[in-house]
Image: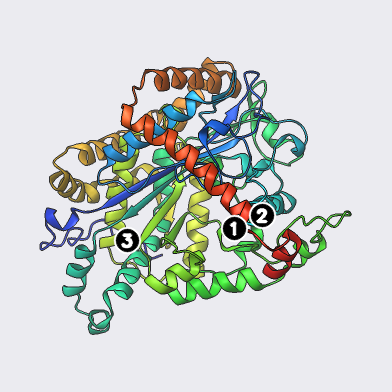
Amino acid sequence: MSQPEPNAQDVLPTWVDAALLQGMLRGIERESLRMQSDGFLSQQAHPQALGSALTHPHITTDYSEALMEFITPPQSSIQHALDYLRDIHSVVHQHLGEGEKLWPLSMPCMLDETDDGIPLAQYGSSNIGRFKTLYRRGLGVRYGRRMQTISGVHYNLSFPEHLFAALQQHESDEQLKALSLQDYRSHRYLGLIRNFIRLTPLVMFLVGASPSVCQCFMTGREHHLLPLLRGTLYLPYATALRMGNFGYQNSAQKKLGIHYNDLTGYLDGLQKAVKTPYLPFSRLGLDDATGEPIQINDHVLQIENEYYSLVRPKQVPQEGETPSQALANRGIGYVELRAVDVNPYSPIGIDEHTAGFLEVLALYCLLQDSPALLDAEQSIIEKNQAEVVNRGRAPNAHIQESDVKTPIEAWGQQYVTAMQPLAALLDQSYATQLYSQALERMMARLHEVDETLSAHMIADTIRHGGTWGFGSYMAQQHAHAYEQHALRPETQTYFDEIAVQSIQQQQQLEQAQGLSFADYVAQYR
C-alpha cells in the first residue's frame, strides 16, 4: 500500500517559505435540517424571506425542502470563512418558521415511518427548477429518501498559483516541467486527492461525529447497530456512521472504476457513467403511471453530481458548462473535502480546529509523493475506513498498510507529528497560532480516544436521554448563539437585498422559457 510516507525528510522542502502559501482560499458548505418543535422534520416550505433556493448564492436547499445548505464565498482566512458562515446562520435563524430550529447533527432528526414525510426540494416552475426537483425524485426512487436526509460539511480549498509555479520549477521530471501550468496544477491536485483518500481514516477518527442514529432512520433496513437508549441505535466504538454503509452510498458506483490518477481518465469515467444505462435503475421506470417523470434517466448517474466521493476535484463552471466541461477547459481549480461530519458542539457545524487541521492535512497531501491509486490499494483503504467508522475507538482498532497492522492511535500520531512543520509554516504565513493549536487538539484526541467528538457525543446522548434529547438541547443552545450574534447593518442589508434579487432572478427564468418541461426532459434524455 502506497501511503504517503510520514517520516520522510522532505515533508517540507527547504525552498518552500511562508510567502508561497499566502493567497490560499477556502469556502465552507454546511447542511442542516429544519426541525419542528416536536423533533420531526419540518413540512413547511423554504422560508420566502430568505429568497429563492434556486438562485440565492449563499442560502439554498439540498435534497429535501427541509434540508438547508449554507455556502460561503471563497475567503482569505479561516476566521473570515467562519465569520461569514456565522452571519448566514444568524440571518437564517431570523426567518425560520414558528418553533423551527436547525438540527445540529449529521444524522437526521425524527422521521416518519414512510418516506412521504421527507418533502423534495422545490425550485419553482422554470424548467431548470423542475429539473432539479426531478433529479432529487430520482435519487429517492433509486436509494430511498432517508439516505438523503444526512447532513455534512464540505470544505473547499485552493492553493495559490505561485505555489504551483514554484513546485513545477523544482521538479526533476522533465515531462512534468514541460506541462502547462494549468495541467501541472491539475496533476498536483490529483496527487492531493489520492493522498487525502489514503488518509480519510484519520479524518473520520479525528472529526467523525456520527457514532449513533435515531432508530427511525433505520426503519425498514437491516442493520447491525445496537440499542444505546430507547429510540437510539449505535455501535460502542463508532466514529462516523455517516461515512459507512448506512450513509451516502451508491453500490452501482463502486463498479465504475472511476479513478483520480489523471484528469482525462477521471472525466472519461464520469462521462461513461452519465451515459451508461444500469438495469436495476431501468427496472424502476422513467415515468410514473400518469406519465410524470420519476428520474432523469436510467443511467448509472442521472447527472455528474450524483457521483459520491470523499473528495472532489472542482472548477467554477461558466454559464452553460457542466462540472466536467469546466474541469476539461480550465483544469482543477480547487478541491472539495467531503469526509467531514457536522460538529454538533459548534453552532455553525465546524470549528477553527477542524478547519485548521483540514488545511494542514491538505497541504501535507499536496507536498507528499502520491503514487497512482489502484484497485488493490483502494480495497485496503475501504477496509481501513470501515474499521474506523464502525470501531475506530476500540482498544484494538488498527490500520492496515501492505501486510502491517498498526494501532490507529500510533498510525495517526505519526502523521500528525509529520504535519507539524507545515502547521508552523501556515502559522507564519497567516500570523496566527491557529494551525499549530489545531494539530495539538487532534493529537490530544489520538492520545486519549475519550477526547474525540464521537466519544463526547455518546456520553452526552446518554446524559440527555437519547438522540432527540441531545440534538434538541444543542439546537436550543445554538439558537441562543444565533440570537446573540450581532450582524453589522451592511451585512443585514446585503442579505435582505440578495433575497429580493434572487426571487426576481427566479421569476425571470420562469418567464423566459419557451420549451415545455416534457420537451426539456426529452431533450436531456
Amino acid identity at mark 1: Glu
Left or right: 497 in relation to 512 = left
Q: Is residue 86 visible?
A: no
Height in image: 199 above or below 277?
above
> Residue 226 at what x, y percent from top left?
65, 31
Q: Quadrant of residue 78?
A: top left
The disc, 3 or 2, on the residue closer to the chain's N-terminal end is 3
Height in image: 521 above or below 77?
below
- CA neighbours of label 2 inside 10 A, class few (<14), some (14 to 19), many (20+): many
Q: In the image, what residue occupies the spot 49% across and 17% down?
A: 476
Amino acid identity at mark 2: Tyr
The disc, 3 or 1, on the residue closer to the chain's N-terminal end is 3
Q: Which residue is mark 2?
A: 135
Which type of secondary structure does the marked residue at label 3 adopt? loop
> Residue 113 at what x, y percent from top left?
77, 32
Left or right: 513 in relation to 317 = right
Which type of secondary structure does the marked residue at label 1 adopt? helix
Whether residues under marks 2 and 1 lie with C-beta atoms below 8 angstroms apart, the answer is yes
Q: CA–CA distance between discs 3 and 2?
A: 38 Å
Amino acid identity at mark 3: Pro
**Label of residue 306 in the image:** 1
Q: Which residue is mark 3?
A: 4
